[in-house]
Image: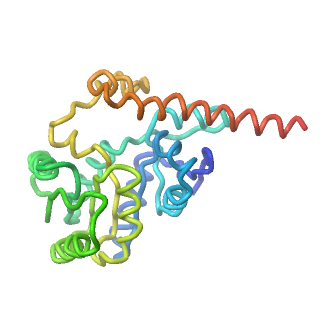
Amino acid sequence: MKQIEILGIKIDNLNLNELLYEIDYFLRSNSGHYLVTINPEFIVEADKNFKFKIILNEADLRVADGFGLILAACLKGQIIKQRISGADLTLEICKLAEQNNYPIYLLGGFGDTAKLAANNLKHRFPKLNILGAEEGIIYPFFDNENSQLLARINKAKPAIIFVAFGAPKQEKWIKENLARMPSICLAMGVGGTFDFLAGKTPRAPHFMRNLGLEWLFRLIIEPWRVKRIFRAVFVFLWLVIKETLSIKSQVVK
């Protein structure tokens, strides 16, 4: 499997069909795997959070989610086959789960968000087997809270779990607890995807997504995200340019 590395983070260079083939293989394997959808904000966080960088690089699949990654790869003279957003991939996995009767569990979001997301998913995929949908636990939490949560998940025995604690909390939780959920074949952090699925947050129009301007749409409707968007757009771009210039200067020497 070909990989591209951006600021020390490995990206699996797959298109959607190739990715779904790998995911289906995981779901038939009866062993635990976790997938991360990497966007520029993840990479900026990993640049100063070494533990998060390890979690991302040790994932079984690392998906390019973010137009900035395509630009960064171009600066390195490489081409990412396809940008696959976490929200779109969640729907594709649910479609696959419905077709093959892989039961799923929705964990995270705030309040009733997971339940609303589950209801909307059932309308879209009537035969989808959703075994649970809950807010779960909020960081920081006590060990007994986590043990009770794991007991609920293990009682339900889903094959897929979508975790919406926000990055890097969701990836950290998955890494620490995947081995304690024996029925889980695929775990994936989904960030704000439940908000989209629940109808609480609108997605950018298709033309803005295609142009890589989803960040601008989010800024317009959620101006309080300005610091996060600044990091994901401008800080990320600066780090990529700095790395590119450093590599070129070493080549010249």
Q: Where does the N terminus fall, quadrant-wise? A: bottom right
Q: Quadrant of residue 206?
A: top left
| Left or right: where 88 falls relative to 3 | left
Q: Residue at x 57, y 51 (%)?
A: 9
Say above or below: 49 vs 178: above
| Left or right: where 33 falls relative to 154 | right
Say above or below: 155 vs 115: below
Q: Residue at x 11, y 57 (%)?
A: 127
Q: Quadrant of residue 162?
A: bottom left
Q: Position of residue 84 (x, y in %)?
A: 41, 42
| Left or right: where 208 falls relative to 155 | right
Q: Position of residue 27 (x, y in %)?
A: 33, 67
Q: Residue at x 16, y 77 (%)?
A: 155
Frontmost residue, 222 versus 158: 222
| Left or right: where 251 falls relative to 125 | right
Q: Residue at x 53, y 42 (%)?
A: 44
Q: Where does the C terminus fall, quadrant-wise? A: top right
Q: Position of residue 74 (x, y in %)?
A: 62, 33
